[in-house]
Image (spheres, rainbow, N blue to C red):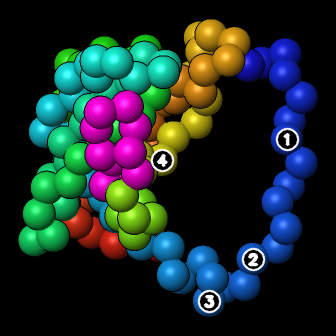
Amino acid sequence: MSGDAVPPRRPELSFAGFESVDMRAGRVVSAEMAIGTRAPSRIISIDLGPLGIVQSVGQLALVPEAELVGRNVVVCINLGPRKIGRYVSEALVLGVPHPDSPEGQAQATPLYVDGSAEAGSQVF
């Protein structure tokens, strides 16, 4: 991705619009590889503490499972369910492009949160 052009900035968003995005710190419980998705992906179970466990399906295949499990990540939990292959993704793990992502894929590295953050804590 280092040789790609930087995408332009998106239109300005009101602060009220930003406040409607529900981002939380969540602890990765498992991160198995998905079967039958268009691009290599993981099914990630994320513990949100008092909010329960949610499932996210995302292109995090280049990040080893052992590096993900037990770590805190930033998750958006109010986008609604999204069908990805035969799976349903209930949350979006936020990330940045993985430097080794193949062309045509959106492999990512998740945004990690300090390990002392409580699962389910609001991100602001």
| Residue 85 included in the magenta stretch of the image | yes
What distance separates the C-alpha of mark 4 from that of mark 1? 17 Å
Quarter holding residue 34: top left
Quarter holding residue 45: top left
The residue under label 4 is: 94
Task: Verify CB contact (< 8 Å) between mark 3 and mark 2.
Answer: no
State the residue in front, 32 or 67: 32
Res. 13 mark: 2
Which residues, given as a range, are shown in magenta? 82-91
- N-terminal of the two: label 4 or label 1? 1
The residue under label 3 is: 16
The residue type indicated by label 4 comes to: Leu
The residue type indicated by label 1 comes to: Pro
Residue 49 visible in the shown view: no
How crowded pointer 2 is (Cα within 10 Å; few <14, some 14-19, many 20+) is rated as few
The residue under label 1 is: 7
At x 84%, y 16%, the residue is 3
Q: Left or right: where does residue 75 sit relative to residue 68?
A: right
**Where is residue 84 drawn, in percent x and y?**
40, 37
The residue type indicated by label 3 comes to: Ala
**SS under mark 2:** loop
